[in-house]
Image: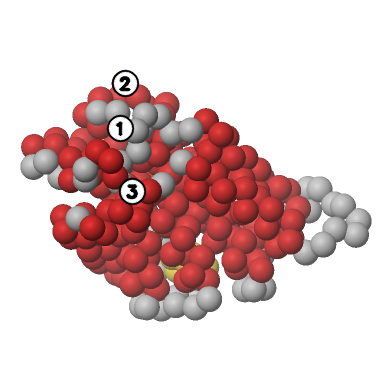
Amino acid sequence: MREVWRMWNYTTMVVLTVLTAGLFAAILIPFKGIPLIPGLTELRPANVIPVVFGLLFGPAGAWGAAFGNLIGDFFGTLGIGSFFGFWGNFLAAYLPYKIWQNRPLEQLPRHLPRFVAAVILGALSCALVVGFGVEAFKLLPFAIIAVAVFINNGLISLILGPLLLKLLAPRVSRWDLAWREQMDPEDCPAGPAPRLGLALVWLGAAGGYLVGLALGFGLVTIPGLPSLAAVLAPFVAILVVGCLLL
């Protein structure tokens, strides 16, 4: 994960962060008038940006998605949930580029299953983090917001992501803007993502999301169970530890 912090030493990476944040916010803001859950989330075609720009610009895309979502929240949905939205959207971009593992984006059809897995993991992680925060502060039940966030992130990215990558990837490559070309090799992770980190990330994200839905919708009832947020907290912790190991 060292590239996430060391990228701030590179001017081009900072510029790409600002570019991502600005574009994400610019697409988010016009759709604030079409709420799915008033005061918390809206129709978000912009949610394709974290995945695509994460794959293109790595950590710059992740920070850009986080700050872009925060900027968008200033236009109608700013609140305590914005903190969790910041980190949820960070993960929506961070985890896809970690799973992709530097494969040529021009060969997306060849690696389509990995792309689908990357989108799903990013969407699950974002939904878990945002849903956990909203549930913990009693703003909305986990099951409602988590489903909305997952669909908003996953479905839109799976539909629009390949089209946008087909358009942008060749240009980013031609202009030498790919994140590994901007950062020194010692500041970039070497080799594939550690299996333990990936396993923990999947366990935390998928496990927490499914357990949250099962308990939230009443599909499973456990007498004497603590609050749902307390049940989800260990899964969020596992997700965080997994991310730190990547």
Sequence order check, earlier mark of 1 and 3: 3
- Residue named by callout 1: 102
- Residue named by callout 3: 3
Residue 242 picture quarter: top right
- Residue named by callout 2: 110
How packed is label 2: few (under 14 Cα within 10 Å), some, or many (20 or more)?
Answer: few
Above or below 180: residue 85: below
Residue 175 in view: yes
Residue 158 picture quarter: top left
The x, y position of residue 67, in whole percent, is 34, 66
**Disc 2 + disc 1, Cβ < 8 Å:** no
Q: Residue at x 74, y 61 (%)?
A: 230
The x, y position of residue 193, in whole percent, is 43, 34
Residue 99 picture quarter: top left
How packed is label 3: few (under 14 Cα within 10 Å), some, or many (20 or more)?
Answer: some
The residue nearer to you, when weighing 8 against 126, is 8
The x, y position of residue 211, in whole percent, is 71, 47
Sequence order check, earlier mark of 2 and 1: 1
Whole-angstrom CA distance, mark 2 to mark 1, is 14 Å
**Disc 1 + disc 3, Cβ < 8 Å:** no
Q: Amino acid at mark 3?
A: Glu
